[in-house]
Amino acid sequence: MNRCPSLSDADRARIIVYLSKWLEVENLSIESDEIIPGTCYRKLGIKGALHPMFFLSADQRFLSGSLLDTAVDPEQQRRIAHEEANRILLADPSPSRGAPSAPVTIVEFGDFQCSYCKKIP
């Protein structure tokens, strides 16, 4: 039996309003909601955010962009995070140069709200 408090529609709306204000982004939505095993912390997938994952505390008061599990080896956490980033970044074909099987992949990010990035041709 799950003793964690449920995430009501009102709670979801409150979280989205908060994140929209905090991130200064509109049209966000909670895409996924899963309880972290052995806890009442929730991992929320946020659609429309540059950082698509947040963790919600058991009392549903605090949001965090990361959650460090001291029961897991940090090297293993880094490896898993690296594999997940590669999976997301390489999920669909992007404009690229060179062989898809090259041993090194360089991903370039830009932010057109950044005054310096706007100037780069």
Image (cartoon, rainbow, N blue to C red):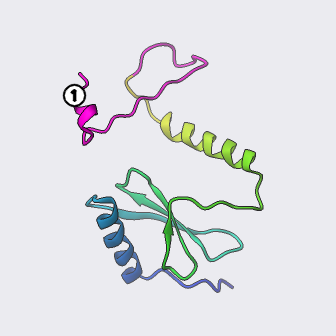
Q: Can you give x and y, in whole percent of width and height, for residue 72 in the image?
A: 76, 56
- For image coordinates 37% across by 83% down, the residue present is 10
Q: Is residue 33 magenta?
A: no
- For image coordinates 51% across by 14% down, the residue present is 99
Task: Look at the numbered disc 1 and give the secondary structure of its residue.
Answer: helix
- For image coordinates 61% across by 83% down, the residue present is 4
The answer to whether 84 appears left or right of 44 in the picture is right
Q: Amino acid at mark 1?
A: Lys
Tell me which corner region of the image, top left, top right, bottom left or bottom right, holds residue 38. bottom right
* Label 1 packing within 10 angstroms: few (<14), some (14-19), many (20+): few
Q: Residue furthest top?
A: 98
Q: In this figure, which residue is indicated by the disc labeled 1?
A: 119
Magenta segment, prevailing SS (helix, strand or loop)? loop
> Looking at this view, is 93 or 77 the one in front?
77
Position of residue 50 relative to residue 98, above or below, is below
> Looking at this view, is 94 or 57 the one in front?
57
The answer to whether 7 appears left or right of 2 in the picture is left
Q: Is residue 103 magenta?
A: yes
Position of residue 16 relative to residue 114, above or below, is below
Q: Can you give x and y, in whole percent of width and height, for residue 95 in the image?
A: 37, 24
- For image coordinates 25% across by 42% down, the residue present is 113
Magenta segment: 96-121
